[in-house]
Amino acid sequence: TAVVRDAGAFAARHPHLAPAVALVAGDVRTAAVPRSATHVVHCASAASPAMNAERPDEVVDIIVAGTDHMLTAAEHAAARGDGVRFLHLSSGSVYGPQPATLERIPETFAGHADPASPAQRFGAAKLAAERRGAIATSRGVRFTVARGFAMIGPRLPLDGAFAIGNFIGDALAGRPVEVRGDGTPVRSWLHAADVAAWCWTILACGAAGAVYNVGSDEAVTIGDAAARIAARAVPPVPVRCLGQGAPGAPPSRYVPDVECARHALGLRVRIPLDDAIARTMAWWRQ
């Protein structure tokens, strides 16, 4: 069963999925969801940059109230003695800015997103939703959290808010790959196939109340990622960095520590970045 905003639009966008699931149309905050589910995957939010800028309060409400509504249904099932596993797709943005001196962010990092900062509002809302999950855990729901970091793979937008998608869009169009900054920020990307495998594993095997980072720990600079993509264009294209960093300023970082997922659940990155780039570009070419 899938809860969707618009059943017709969902079926049009995903014709291969629509026949396989029962669609429940409605807002995730109020939709009449079934209370007999044994497993719940909750990933609903409104994360578009435009909506975050124009209707920030609604974005926060969708995340927080939507999670509360879904957990309430799960709690009813748990109260009947039914085993309910609940996977909440959260975000690495809950940690707030990563210190430049911290190579990778572990789940135990004490930092958190500031709800008063427009740039961190989304992460703060996701963290609030996680805390609601802790209440559900005390009520018998096997609540687990997947904190997603940057991703790459099929359906990645090529002209949106994701730098690596824009790089691929440039390369596939035969344009120079354009880096809007100086190329020094450090990032990592996990392929969608790995993301799915990790999330299913966390849902099925994760400990109740546990939090797991979901991402790659293969750290590269934005400039290096752009160069790898530019080299795969046919023919290869140049890279243009449009910005300049502040002298002496350390580069920003957004890279997870995934030792918890590795040791507790046996998960690992199976698709390295170069292969992930090649697969994503091949998907778009087709």
Image (cartoon, rainbow, N blue to C red):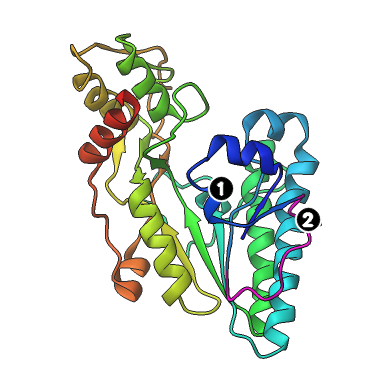
Would you say 125 lies left or right of 190 here? Answer: right
Q: Residue furthest bottom?
A: 81
Specify which label sits upstream in the sequence, 1 or 2.
Answer: 1
Q: Residue at x 70, y 61 (%)?
A: 67
Q: Residue at x 21, y 37 (%)?
A: 274
Q: In the rendering, at what x and y percent does residue 25 appear?
A: 73, 50
Over which residues does the magenta segment extend?
26-39
From the image, tell me which residue sits under label 2.
Answer: 29
Q: Residue at x 71, y 30 (%)?
A: 53
Nearest the viewer among 8 and 129 is 8
Q: Is residue 200 magenta?
A: no
Would you say 89 lies left or right of 31 here? Answer: left
Dot 1 surroundings within 10 Å: few (below 14), some, or many (20 or more)?
some
Q: In the rendered structure, find residue 62 and report the number of the disc placed on it.
A: none
Would you say 263 lies left or right of 205 here? Answer: left
Q: In the rendering, at what x and y percent does residue 59 appear?
A: 73, 43
Q: Say which amino acid is labelled 2.
A: Arg
Q: Relative to residue 127, is residue 76 depicted above or below?
A: below
From the image, tell me which residue sits under label 1.
Answer: 18
- Helix or strand or loop: what does disc 2 sit on? loop
Q: Is residue 106 visible?
A: no
Q: Say which amino acid is labelled 1.
A: Ala
- Helix or strand or loop: what does disc 1 sit on? helix
